[in-house]
Amino acid sequence: MRLVRAALVAALLLCAAPAVAEQAQPALTGDVRIHDPSIIEVDGRYVAFQTGQEGGLYRGAIRAKTSPDGIAWTDAGSIGKGVPKWQRKELGYQSLNIWAPSVSKHGDTWYLYYSVSSFGINTSAIGLMTSTALDPDKPGEGWQDQGLVLKSNGKDDWNAIDPWRIDTTDGRAYLAYGSFWNGIKMRELDPVTGKLLAEDTPTYDLASRQGAGIEATSILEHDGRFYLFVSFDQCCKQLDSTYNMRIGRADSVTGPYLDKDGKPMLEGGGTLLLGKTGRFIGPGGQEAIRTTRGDMLAYHYYDGDDLGVSKLQFSPLRWTADGWPELDPLP
């Protein structure tokens, strides 16, 4: 009888105990309209860069936003006024805007890689801007364009867009890039200039879907392993967007990358990190970064409650016991 009474008391206490709230990704505020976000921490604050808007006063220039805490965001204008002049000479046409900028820091220099292209073709180029004094109050100032890093054309089986730089713990630097065609590639950089280490430096193949949608690369080093984040399928269709974020892991920055099931990402593998969920349509365009708050993931989604407007999400990355990144539930 005592055991029965004890069990009843325990059950009543359990029912009376307050429910523990499930941790969720933060609900961002302010001006969170963004596409292809790239975020960097500067003196405890956050600066985001994004794909430029076609037309208007700034003619497709990279846009910037700032935040004191990664939660509340404010528009901070543009970098320059339009697509760099060298682009027309290199590609033979005028791009309408700058795509998918990606910001990083090495030593005392900030590097901002970007791409210029047009939908449906792979006559594209990746360029570079640098700054020695990124001011989070005025993030659009102080950038110097360093010109072309690499380009692709209709004869290539790859597309020179969506750049991502990673500086590894052994002092080397690499640029990953690619979209559709034969997938994601990588070449080694001179860590100081930010340009290719040599004109004939090897090209590494990281991931491919044999022509299907794969792009928006970023790579994060964690506990001696490398994690490749990509977006599958298609962006830029608002409520009809099908982006979803996938991951793989490797022991070397140059691969081979395998998903949780052991399938090579060069054979279409990629473990789902986040897909369409409620009003969060087509999450992707992601970058995984390290901050003083821990590892974070910046990405955009199309808001199903706001006519498919592209918006920012900036969330902590959690690590499972077996060494895989995951996200908290959506807010």
Image (cartoon, rainbow, N blue to C red):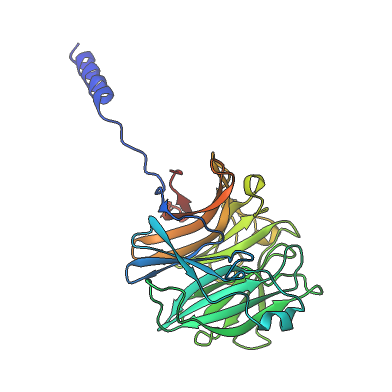
- Which of 153 and 289 lies nearest the eye of the viewer? 153
Q: Where is residue 250 in the image (x, y as percent from the top left)?
A: 55, 64
Where, by quadrant of the figure, is residue 201 drawn?
bottom right
Q: Residue farthest to the left?
A: 2
Total residue callouts: 0
Left/right of residue 251 with respect to residue 106 in the rendered view: right
- Which of 147 and 258 lies nearest the eye of the viewer? 147
- Which of 29 and 231 lies nearest the eye of the viewer? 29
Where, by quadrant of the figure, is residue 19 drawn?
top left
| The N terminus sits in image quarter | top left
Q: Position of residue 192 (x, y in %)?
A: 49, 87
- In the rendered image of this protein, does residue 90 appear above or below residue 232? below
- In the rendered image of this protein, does residue 255 appear above or below residue 109? above
Instruction: Kindly tell me whether residue 328 is visible in this rendering.
Output: yes
Left/right of residue 259 with respect to residue 213 in the rendered view: left
- Which of 273 and 29 lies nearest the eye of the viewer? 29
| The C terminus sits in image quarter | top left
Q: Residue farthest to the front?
A: 57
What residue appears at the point 58 percent right and 65 percent down from the top-left corner? Answer: 51
Q: Residue farthest to the top?
A: 1
Q: Position of residue 162 (x, y in %)?
A: 61, 68
Instruction: Kindly tell me whether residue 195 is visible in this rendering.
Output: no
Q: Where is residue 243 in the image (x, y as percent from the top left)?
A: 62, 51
What residue appears at the point 49 percent right and 81 percent down from the top-left corner? Answer: 143
What residue appears at the point 75 percent right and 73 percent down from the top-left corner? Answer: 123
- In the rendered image of this protein, does residue 180 appear above or below residue 252? above
